[in-house]
Image: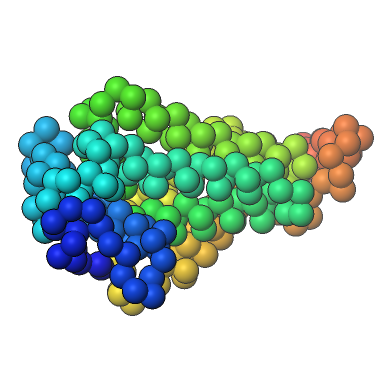
Amino acid sequence: MPKATNSDRSGGPRTPAGRSGTSRRELVENEILEHATRLFAERGFAGTSLQDVADAMSLTRPALYYYVKSKDELLAKLVEEVVQAPAAALKEIGGRDDLDAADKLRMLVRTVATRIATHANRFRLLVKSEAELPADVAKAHADARHAVLDAVVNVLDQGVTAGRFRPVDTRVAALGILGMCNWVAWWYHPGGSVDIDTVSELLADMAVAGVQRADHRKLRDDSPGAVIAMLREDLDHLERLISDQ
C-alpha cells in the first residue's frame, strides 16, 4: 500500500515519478478506506473522526481533505464500492443477449462472491453497522441492495419463462442465493487451501443446480404450446401412476 510522502504530510499530494495521478489517487483512496474500515469497526462511526483517519495515514487534515471531505463521504465511498458497483455490473449481465439464463446466473454468482471476498472487511462493516449509517447513505445502501436482489430475480424469471429453471418463487430463490454468497465474507480467508475462483465457481454450480430443470424437462421453446406439451407429459405420467394403484 502507498505511504504518505513528505509533501503529502505538509499539504497537497504529489504524484510520484512514473505513476499517473489517477492511479496514485486510487491507491491512496483505497488505503484511506482500509484504515477507515478498521477504525469504524473498532470504534464505531460516531467514535471515529477524520483526524483519526488522518493520523492512521500519517497525513495532515489538509492533505486528507484532498481525498475525502467528511466521514459521510467515506461511508458513501464504501457503499459505492461494496454494493453499488456490483449492482450495476449485475444489471448489465442480466441484460445480455448472448447468454442464456443459466450462464447469466453463473456469472452473477461469481461476480457477487468474488466481490464480497475481495472486500470482506468492508462488507461485514456495512452489514453490522446499517443502523448507524446517515440517512442518505443508508438509503443509497438499501437502494443498491434492492438493485442486486432485483438483478438476480430478473435472471431467475428469465430462466423460468424460458423453461430452463423450475417454476420456483424467484424472490425467495434469489434471497437464498445471495445469502449463500454473503456468507463468504465471514468464512473465506485469502491464502487458504481454496482460492476465490474455485469458491465462486462452486457457488455458481450450486445456484444453478438448485433451480434448473432436469435436461429431459427443458422446454423446446418459450411458447404456450411448449408449456402445454410439458403439462400433458405430466398428466400422462400422473395417469400411469394412478392406473398402477
Q: Position of residue 55 (x, y in %)?
A: 8, 53
Can residue 195 be spotted in the picture?
A: yes
Can residue 38 be spotted in the picture?
A: no
Q: Nearer the viewer, residue 84 or 10?
A: 10
Q: Is residue 29 above or below residue 47?
A: below
Which quadrant is the N terminus positioned in? bottom left
Q: Position of residue 209 (x, y in %)?
A: 59, 55
Residue under the point 39% across and 47% down: 81
Q: Is residue 109 above or below residue 198?
A: above
In this figure, which colouring scheme has been used for the structure? rainbow
Q: Is residue 16 above or below residue 72?
A: below
Please state the total of marks drawn on the protein image: 0
Residue under the point 60% across and 42% down: 91
Instruction: Locate residue 68 relative to residue 240 in the image: left or right.
Output: left
Q: Position of residue 119 (x, y in %)?
A: 34, 55
Which quadrant is the C terminus positioned in? top right
Instruction: Locate residue 140 relative to residue 125 in the image: left or right.
Output: right
Q: Nearer the viewer, residue 74 or 8?
A: 8
Q: Nearer the viewer, residue 19 or 221?
A: 19
Q: Position of residue 93 (x, y in %)?
A: 63, 48
Residue under the point 21% across and 37% down: 71
Instruction: Locate residue 122 relative to residue 204 in the image: left or right.
Output: left
Which residue is at the far right?
225
Q: Nearer the viewer, residue 131 or 217?
A: 131
Residue under the point 34% across and 42% down: 77
